[in-house]
C-alpha cells in the first residue's frame, strides 16, 4: 500500500463529493449532510487540516472513539447544532475513562454523521478513520457492527447545545443505551452529539466496515462528474456502489409522523418508464426499511434502499420527501458484515418488526469502488 | 449539646415511628414508606447499625451526598426496588468526582425517601444526617433547598435495578437535570436510585432543613401512642408537627392520571362533622399541592397538605386514595427555608402552574418538636 492510500486529506472537492455520496448511502435518513458540509467548508476556509487514515493503518493499541449526532433528521434540519457537541461528549468520555482518543471514527457513513466526525477532527486535531459501523445509516444505536460484534457500548457520553452532558458508565446492552440516550436527547431538544464506543485499534479493525468515507467520496465524485458530462448520474452511482435501480416513478403520497424521536412513515410511488402501471410502497423509520412492489417485498434492511432524483441522482432524504418528485429507487447490497446471522438479528427485517426474512439483493456493496479507484 | 443529641441509632421502634411520620410529611406523595420500613427492619435483624447524626455535628470539610429514589409513587408500590440502587449511583458518583462520601443525607423526609437512606446506610456503613432538603416531599428534583440555595446539582448519578448507571457531570440547572434524569428513569422502568448533590459539610449545613428525621420519628411516636391510649391521634400529630385540621370529610371522587412519570389528579371530599355541607378539592402532582374549599384556596404549596385517616391519623397516600375513606385534611406550615422569596419561585403555587400567590398557614413547622423532645 502506498502512502497516498494510507492517508488522504479532506479538501473542498472531497467534502462536496462526500456530502452527495453520504446522502445516497443514508437511504433517506441519517440527516441531511448539507449542514455538515457547510461546517467542514468553514473549517477548511479557516485552515483546518482533516486527515483521513485507512482502517488497516490504525495500530492495535491505539484508542478510537466513534462520534456523531443523535436525533431525528427532521429535527436536525430545523435546529442546527452548535457543532462541537460530539467533542464535548468525547472530552467527558475521555475524562471518565482516563484514556485519550487517538482517532475519531464515523458512526454511520449515511447522512450527517458522515461529515460530523470531519468537523470534530478540525476542532480536535484528531485524524478520522476511513470506516464506519453501518456502511449506511440506521435509526438506532445498537444497529452497528461495533455492538453486533461485541465491542462494549459503554462508557458512552452525549452532550447538548448548552454543553450539558450525560454519561452512561455501564448499561447492560446497547439497546438500553439507545433508550436512555434517546430519552435524554429528546429532553435536550431533540438533538445531541455523542461519543462512544471507546475502543482499541484492534477492536475497531475487527468490527468496522472499511473504506466507507472513500466510498462516499467516490460515489459523489462519479455522480457529480456525470451531471457535468450529461451522462446518467444514476448509472454512475451504481457503477461505484454496486446494486441496481429497483423502481422509477413519481411520489404520490407521504405519510410521516414523529414517534418517540423518530420520523416514521410510508412513501407511495407510481411507476414511470418501464415501471408504468406498477406501484411501490416504502416504509421508513428515519431510514428506508422495506420496499414493496404490490404485495412483494423487493428489498429490505439491511440492504440499502435509496431514493434519488431521476435526472441528477441527488438523494431525496426523509425530511424533504414530497408529492410529485420523480425519482429512482436504488437498491444497494449491504456490506457483508451486516449480512451475517448475528447481524440480521439486529438489523434484519424482523428486528424492525416485520414478519419476513431477509432476501439479499444480488451484488456486492461498493463493488465498483476498486475499479474506480484504480482509474483515478 | 449532649452526646445523645448528636447521634442516635435507628432501632425497630424508631423505624416504625419514622414510617408513620414520613407518611404524613409526604403529603400524599413521596411513595409509601412501608417497603422501606421492611427493608430497614430486615437490615436491623441482620445486625446493621444505622447511626443518625445531627446536622450541626457535621464538619465543614466533610463530604455529604443525598441519596434516594426517583419515580412516581404509584410505580414504587408495584415495582419494588432491588434496594441498593442509590448506593450503586453513589459509588459511580464518588468514582467520577474522585471523592468519598462521609455522610448520607435524605433528599426528602416525606415518604419512601425518608427510609431509603437508612437502608443505604446499612449497606454502606455511612451515617445518616438528621436533615433533608424539603422538610416534606416534592415531585421534582429542583424543588429542594440544596438547589434553591445554590449547591450545584451536578455531578449526579442514577442507577436502576440492573445496576445500569447514568451520570450527569454538568447540567445548566437542576430543572434540566430533573428532565434528563426523569426521562432515563422512565426508560429504566419507572424507578431508579439517585445520588446527588455531592457537597461539603459547610454547604449542607447552610442549606438543609435540620432535624427532620427526628421530627418524622416524633410525629410517628405520638400518633402511635395516641392510638394505643385511645386519645386523638390527629391532635397528637398536630401537637408535634404544628398546623391545624383544614377539613374533615369523606373522599367522594379521585381522578388520577400518569403523565410523564408523575401521578397527577384531583381529590374531591364531602364535609363531615363541623364541615358538613362543604366540599374540598385537592389537586396533586405526586404530592398534594392545593386545597380549595369552594372557590377559596385554603392551603397551598409549599405548606404541607396531608390527608390522614380520621380515627388513626394513618397517612392516606396518593396511590391508595379511594372513594369513601373518612379523612382529616391536615395543614402543616412549611419550614422557613421554603417560605423565602427565593424558595417560592421554585416551590410556590406559581411554580406548579397555579395563578395565585402563596398565603402562608399560621404557625411553625415542627412547632411541638422541642417540647415533645424535652418530655421524652
Image: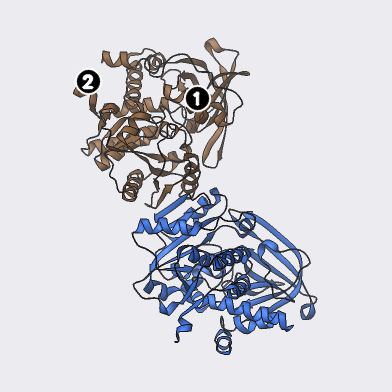
Chain colours: A blue, B brown
Query: Would residue B194 be found to the left or right of residue A179 on screen?
Result: left
- The residue sitting at 45% across, 70% down in the picture is A127
Dot 2 lies on which element?
loop
Query: Would residue A272 be found to the left or right of residue B132 on screen?
Result: right
- The chain carrying label 2 is B
Query: Would residue B113 be found to the left or right of residue A223 on screen?
Result: left
Tell which of A302 and A2 is nearer to you: A2
Decide: is A173 above or below A246: above
Viewer can see residue B103: yes
Decide: is A4 above or below A43: below
Q: Residue B103's spot in the image, x, y percent?
A: 28, 37
Figure quadrant of residue A360: bottom right
Which corner quadrant holds the C terminus of chain B? top left
Which corner quadrant holds the N terminus of chain B? top left
- The residue sitting at 43% across, 60% down in the picture is A173
- The chain carrying label 1 is B
Tell which of B49 and A126 is nearer to you: A126
Residue that carries the numbered disc 1 in the rendered image = B341
Residue that carries the numbered disc 2 in the rendered image = B1
Tell which of A155 and B306 is nearer to you: A155
Q: Residue B111's spot in the image, x, y percent?
A: 40, 31
- Mark 2 closeness class: few <14, some 14–19, many ≥20 residues within 10 Å: few
Q: Residue A178's spot in the image, x, y percent?
A: 49, 58
Q: Nearer the viewer, mark 2 or mark 1?
A: 1
Q: Residue B80's spot in the image, x, y percent?
A: 40, 42
Amino acid at each position: 500500500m502506498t502512502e497516498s492510500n494510507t492517508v488522504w486529506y479532506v479538501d473542498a472537492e472531497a467534502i462536496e463529493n462526500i456530502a452527495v455520496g453520504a446522502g445516497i448511502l443514508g437511504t433517506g435518513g441519517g440527516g441531511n449532510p448539507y449542514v455538515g458540509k457547510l461546517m467542514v467548508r468553514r473549517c477548511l476556509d479557516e485552515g483546518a487540516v482533516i486527515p483521513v487514515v485507512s482502517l488497516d493503518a490504525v495500530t492495535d493499541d491505539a484508542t478510537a472513539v466513534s462520534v456523531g449526532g443523535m436525533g431525528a433528521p427532521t429535527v436536525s434540519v430545523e435546529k442546527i447544532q452548535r457543532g462541537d457537541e460530539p467533542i464535548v461528549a468525547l472530552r467527558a468520555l475521555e475524562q471518565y475513562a482516563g484514556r485519550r482518543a487517538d482517532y475519531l471514527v464515523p458512526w454511520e457513513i449515511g447522512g450527517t454523521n458522515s461529515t460530523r466526525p470531519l468537523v470534530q477532527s478540525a476542532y480536535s486535531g484528531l485524524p478520522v478513520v476511513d470506516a464506519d459501523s453501518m456502511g449506511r445509516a440506521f435509526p438506532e444505536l445498537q444497529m452497528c457492527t461495533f455492538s453486533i460484534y461485541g465491542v462494549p457500548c459503554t462508557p458512552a457520553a452525549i452532550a447538548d447545545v448548552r454543553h450539558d452532558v450525560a454519561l452512561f458508565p455501564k448499561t447492560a446492552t446497547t439497546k438500553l443505551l439507545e433508550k436512555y440516550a434517546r430519552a435524554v436527547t429528546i429532553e435536550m431538544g431533540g438533538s445531541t452529539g455523542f461519543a462512544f464506543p471507546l475502543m482499541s485499534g484492534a477492536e475497531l479493525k475487527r468490527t468496522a466496515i472499511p473504506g466507507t468515507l472513500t466510498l462516499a467520496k467516490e460515489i459523489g465524485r462519479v455522480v457529480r462528474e456525470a451531471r457535468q458530462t450529461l451522462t446518467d448520474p444514476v448509472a454512475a452511482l451504481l457503477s461505484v456502489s454496486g446494486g441496481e435501480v429497483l423502481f422509477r416513478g413519481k411520489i404520490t403520497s407521504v405519510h410521516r409522523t414523529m414517534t418517540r424521536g423518530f420520523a416514521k412513515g410510508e412513501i407511495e410511488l407510481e411507476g414511470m418508464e418501464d415501471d408504468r402501471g406498477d406501484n411501490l410502497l416504502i416504509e421508513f423509520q428515519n431510514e428506508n426499511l422495506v420496499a414493496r412492489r404490490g404485495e412483494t417485498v423487493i428489498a429490505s434492511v439491511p440492504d440499502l434502499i435509496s431514493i434519488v432524483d431521476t435526472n441528477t441522482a441527488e438523494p431525496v432524504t426523509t425530511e424533504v420527501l414530497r408529492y410529485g418528485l420523480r425519482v429512482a429507487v436504488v437498491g444497494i447490497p449491504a456490506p457483508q458484515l451486516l449480512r451475517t446471522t448475528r447481524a440480521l438479528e439486529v438489523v434484519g427485517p424482523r428486528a424492525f418488526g416485520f414478519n419476513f426474512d431477509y432476501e439479499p439483493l444480488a451484488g456486492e456493496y461498493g463493488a465498483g469502488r476498486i475499479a474506480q479507484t484504480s482509474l483515478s
